[in-house]
Amino acid sequence: MRFEGKVALVTGGAGGIGSATASRLAAEGARVAVCDLDAEAAGALAADLGGLGLELDVRSDESIAAAVAAYLASGEAAYVTGETVGVSGGLGMM
Ligand SMILES: NC(=O)c1ccc[n+]([C@@H]2O[C@H](COP(=O)([O-])OP(=O)(O)OC[C@H]3O[C@@H](n4cnc5c(N)ncnc54)[C@H](O)[C@@H]3O)[C@@H](O)[C@H]2O)c1
């Protein structure tokens, strides 16, 4: 339980590497904020993991700010972040 008592925010968290990362972090004791373009899938996985599902588009500063604000408003504080969606073509990684 390496992440007991900690919270983790995982972008692209509803699918592929992101969902595997979110699930592993939850299994290791973290409370996970599953952040994804697909809000429905993020919510479904978060419900399974006992975490928080948030809509987030890593291409949009406004979307990131809104998701982080919603996350902080939930009373959580970030200790671990996992970014599993990259953006190429000059926009950079979150
Ligand atoms: N799978 C691999 O072997 C592999 C290898 C090297 C790099 N990558 C990179 O790792 C990342 C994840 O790969 P994957 O195979 O898990 O992909 P995936 O398509 O299985 O999952 C990606 C998740 O990210 C979400 N997503 C897509 N665009 C988004 C956006 N703009 N904002 C927020 N969420 C978004 C999707 O809804 C999905 O839930 C990709 O950037 C991919 O290019 C993957």
Image (tube, grey):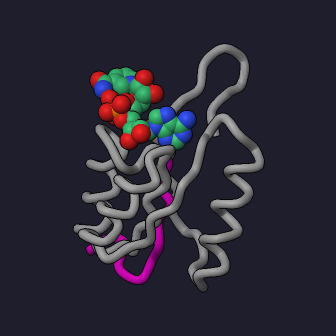
Residue 6 falls left or right of residue 68? left
Relative to 9, is 60 on the left or the right? right
Residue 2 included in the magenta stretch of the image = yes
73 up-or-down from 40: above or below: below
Rendered residue at 31%/62% (across/down): 44
Q: Position of residue 90 (x, y in %)?
A: 72, 18
Which residue is pictured at 49% across the width and 55% down the height?
A: 35
Number of labelled discs?
A: 0
Q: Is residue 72 left or right of residue 4?
A: right
Q: x, y percentage for residue 40?
A: 39, 56
Query: Looking at the image, which residue is at 58% across and 50% down?
Result: 56
Q: Nearer the viewer, residue 46 or 27?
A: 46
Residue 88, percent from left and from top? 60, 18
Q: Quadrant of residue 5?
A: bottom left
**Residue 80 vs residue 36, the one in the foreground:** 36
Residue 43, quarter of picture: bottom left
Q: Judge from the rendering whether residue 69 lies leftward or rightward of residue 54; answer left or right.
A: right
Q: Quadrant of ligand 1?
A: top left
In the rendered image, residue 21 lying in the magenta stretch gets the answer no
Q: Which residues are magenta?
A: 1-11
Q: Residue furthest front?
A: 40
Quadrant, the N terminus:
bottom left
- Residue with the most extreme top position: 89
User: Which of the 4 image quadrants contains residue 32?
Assistant: bottom left
Q: Quadrant of the C terminus?
A: top right
Residue at image location 47% in from the left, 72% down from the top: 7
In x, y percent, where is residue 4? 35, 79
